[in-house]
Image (spheres, grey):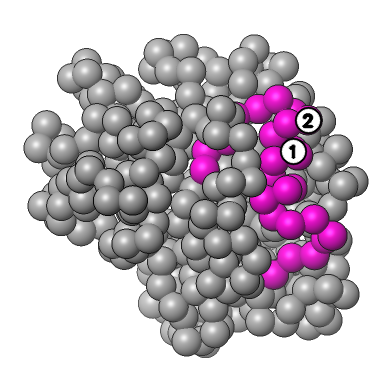
Amino acid sequence: MIGLGYRREMSDWEMSGVQADFFEVAPENWVRRDRGPLHELIAAGHPVYLHGVSLNLGGSSPLNLDFVRAVRELMADLNTSVYSDHLAASGDAHQLYDLFPIPFTQAEVVRVSDRIRQVQDVLGQRLSIENTTWYTNIGELSEVDFLAEVAERADCGIVLDLNNVVVNHKNHGGNDLRGFVQGIDLQRVSYLHVAGHEWDERFGLYIDTHSEPVERVTAEMARHLHQTQGLAVLLEWDNDVPTMDILNQELACLRLSSTM
Amino acid sequence: MSSAFFDHVRGRSDEVPAGYTAQGLRVYRHLVYLGVSQMIEAHFPAVREQLGEAGWRTLIEAYIRQSTWTSPYYGDLTDDFLAYLARESA
């Protein structure tokens, strides 16, 4: 299955023209909003997955379990069992609405996986965690070992973001895409994320902007895992959303048979 | 990710906590500013126009140093911003 992140910009699109099998939305945007557009997608045969940003799994403030219960209700309403958030913090004691790196340490493996278990207890099912882009971080573990150990200890799923692996490798070295994929248990992966990124001269770093086409190496790995592991692939394009034609071209490119 | 990390990101301090890079922290400070600036502007476009670029940046930066927003819903940021303005002008 090939999917697309559903954006508000698409609310006046004729969605039957979008060549996606499934869609993904942020639950934060829909808990308190009219879910009509999502029910239309579902009625047309396209499942809707939830991918959140505010759980603050890596933060130090108590988890907002009322919010988790609201998401559980949304999942029931949308008839979906797929919910993920990021292996990151959303702020300090307060929300800062971005994703901040959790130190790659053994102590954080224990602390964060306990928080994930707490969320899963309220959901009554598995949560998936996404590997994120980070611009500076500390800790004695490699990122992939940190991710693998948290997932194992929490017994949770993984949304494997291939673009984030590529961005982090360009910025910091360490595992390349192949090495990273080899470092995790693919049985835990619920599906894949792909997106584009940009070089930012101001910072001297690649930034995960979700505003560009998917790079060749990322698309190739996505097609390979799609074919060999049956993993679904979701395209994220959140900023400077292009026309439907260009999105359809990107989606078609993810469908092409692999040459790997 | 100590409080020193977030003090830097919020612009309360320019100190770089041990092990982090100044370059990476600059990205986080920038991203937080961008997110807040865009959300506040979307709700109060006239304010930005009235203040001009420099005044707007000063206001948003001051707010980010002290924001106390805890809601998981992005839109609620505006409530916290209004509460901040009320505190400041009290």
Q: Is residue A145 magenta?
A: yes
In the picture, measured across the screen, residue A173 lies left or right of residue A113, that is left
Residue A92, percent from left and from top: 77, 54
Q: Which residues fall within the magenta stretch?
A: A136-160
A196 w.r.t. A36: above or below: below
Q: Secondary structure at mark 2?
A: helix
Q: Nearer the viewer, residue A197 or A241?
A: A197
Q: Circle 1 marks a residue in which chain?
A: A
Residue B17's tag is: none
- Quarter of the image where the N terminus of chain B is located: bottom right
Q: Quarter of the image holding residue A152?
A: top right
Question: Alpha-carbon neighbours of circle 2 within 10 Å: few (<14), some, or many (≥20)?
Answer: some
In the picture, measured across the screen, residue A197 lies left or right of residue B56, that is left
Point 39% across, 17% down: residue: A78
A7 w.r.t. A208: above or below: above
Point 26% across, 57% down: residue: A241
Q: Note whether residue A95 is visible.
A: no
Residue A153's tag is: 2
Residue type (three-letter) at the residue carrying disc 1: Val
- Quarter of the image where the C terminus of chain B is located: bottom right
Q: Is residue A100 magenta?
A: no
Residue A59, percent from left and from top: 76, 47
Asked whether the beta carbons under mark 2 and mark 1 sit within 8 Å of each other, the answer is: yes
Q: Quarter of the image holding residue A68?
A: top right
Q: Circle 2 marks a residue in which chain?
A: A
Point 83% across, 73% down: residue: B19
Residue type (three-letter) at the residue carrying disc 2: Arg
Q: Nearer the viewer, residue A91 or B49?
A: A91
Point 62% across, 61% down: residue: A175
Q: Which residue carries the number 1 mark?
A: A150
Outermost residue toward the front? A260
Determine the CA span between mark 2 and mark 1. 5 Å
